[in-house]
Image (cartoon, helix red, strand yellow):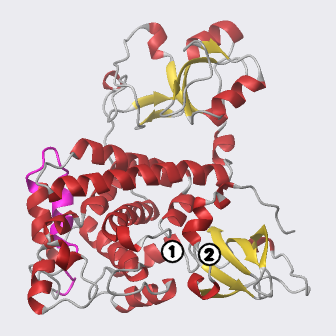
Amino acid sequence: MPFDIQMPSRALLMFRFKDRYFLTLSGFTKEPIKEETRLTMSKREKGIIRIHVYELSIGMCVCRLETLEKESPFLFDRFDIKTQADIQAIQAVCDYVFIDVYRQKKCYGAIPTRNTEAAKQLSFARSFEQSARTYQHTSNLIKTVMDDIRFGNQLSVKAVKEAVSDCVDKVLENSDAMLLLTQLKHQDEYTAQHSLNVCILAILLGRELKLSTEELNRVGLCGLLHDIGKMKVPLEILNKPGALEAHEMEIMRKHAVFGRDILMSARDIYPGAIDVAYGHHEHLVGTGYPRGVDKTSLTIFTKMVAVVDAYDAITSDRVYQKGRPHLTALGGLIKAMNTEFEANFVIQFINCIGFYPQGNLVELSSGEIGIVVEQNKSDRLKPKVLLIRDENKETMNEQLLDLALNVHDINGMPYKIKQIIRSQDYNFDLIKFSHDGKFTHNYPAIK
């Protein structure tokens, strides 16, 4: 399947519609635009571009702030940035702004260049806060969508596509933060949260496979809607705390068919999402359900979603069983390579999330306990760890440890990860830790 998407002509790109391409300083990109107002093709409007607030500098002319909930602190929509305080005020209320390049050139003699390094160096704390907002918004949306389907309403394809686009943006901006969010699991919200996690994990796998942004949006959509058919399964079966009887299992397995039918009736749905909803429980050797077809009948996206769906299901608490550890889940995927799952996708998924993924609680060689918060792309065995318990397993002031720096502990030995541990064994609540804002702090680093 070819993944390169041919770009439309320049004349078609100058629009502020949500699903159109938009001109930025680095070229044409597909960015979510909040205002549905067409840009006129005047000389001035052609010079309006969208940039991240961390790329702002004194002298730029701001046309509009891209705000969602917070009100602008500025009296006028269009103004010149005159002080560093102006920049800080903008950064406090939004992530993106529109600037007028022609006014900048006229008033200050030069068109600004993108400070891409500044944008890349957003702190993990700020990125996590932004990603958490996207995650919560999409989580609320998918719950609403599922309720609509359960009550017989039509699927809102436009809203779902927009939510997936936001997830793609955040994964590309900071995959560490988004992967960490997939670990904040609520058993009572399993179906909706599982769908969102599969969406994010599918996007992460797609990025590892170097898919285009357009393809990332498509595979993310497939992940988000893969279990939509469960909304037609009776709640007493879907939420049954014990093992299902044979006739109940037969009904549960029909969710793949229900999902196909729901998506086939939706307007403007990506056809690949129908294939994934129908086939994500099929196996390469033909032992899956509902049709029992082999790999020759399965699309690439179906095979990708099957891998990440199984991983998130294995590691999640459900009404009938507790989630299993990360390494146990990886072992299950590896064992099922070439029978249930495409081997290359399993390997690339492991490369993507690492052996110590974000959100996992680990015990270090020193006896201290920490949470994995960021990956080290050059050495997956040496991530960044936020220490939360000392060598006696007592609460401590949190400190950030970068294992890639080969830092030594109090005994003069280099820090190493000893093992992944279960949070419940140490009475640690990852969800409460996040809700208390702990991931949005800047912690002192151990050196």
Q: How many marks?
A: 2
Q: Is residue 395 above or below residue 65?
A: below
Magenta-drawn stretch contains 274? yes
Name the residue: 33% across, 28% down: 17
Q: Is residue 62 above or below residue 426?
A: above
The picture quadrant where one finds residue 16 is top left
Q: Position of residue 11 (x, y in %)?
A: 33, 21
Depth order, front residue of 350/325: 325
Name the residue: 65% across, 33% down: 91
The numbered disc on residue 380 is: 2
Q: Is residue 332 visible?
A: yes
The numbered disc on residue 162 is: none
Report the Cα–Cα distance between label 2 and label 1: 8 Å
Q: Position of residue 407 (x, y in %)?
A: 84, 75
Question: SS class of the residue under badge 2?
Answer: loop
Q: Position of residue 228 (x, y in %)?
A: 21, 63
Name the residue: 30% across, 56% down: 143
Name the residue: 77% across, 88% down: 367
- Residue 283 horizontal side relative to residue 82, left or right: left
CB contact under 8 Å: marks 2 and 1 = yes
**In this picture, which residue range is highlighted in magenta?**
264-285
Residue under circle 1?
351
Question: SS class of the residue under badge 1?
Answer: helix
Amino acid type at image mark 2: Arg
Of the numbered discs 2 and 1, the one sitting upstream in the chain is: 1
Q: Position of residue 242 (x, y in %)?
A: 26, 89
Label 2 CA crowd tier, 10 Å (few <14, some 14–19, many 20+)? some
Amino acid type at image mark 1: Asn
Q: Is residue 375 visible?
A: no
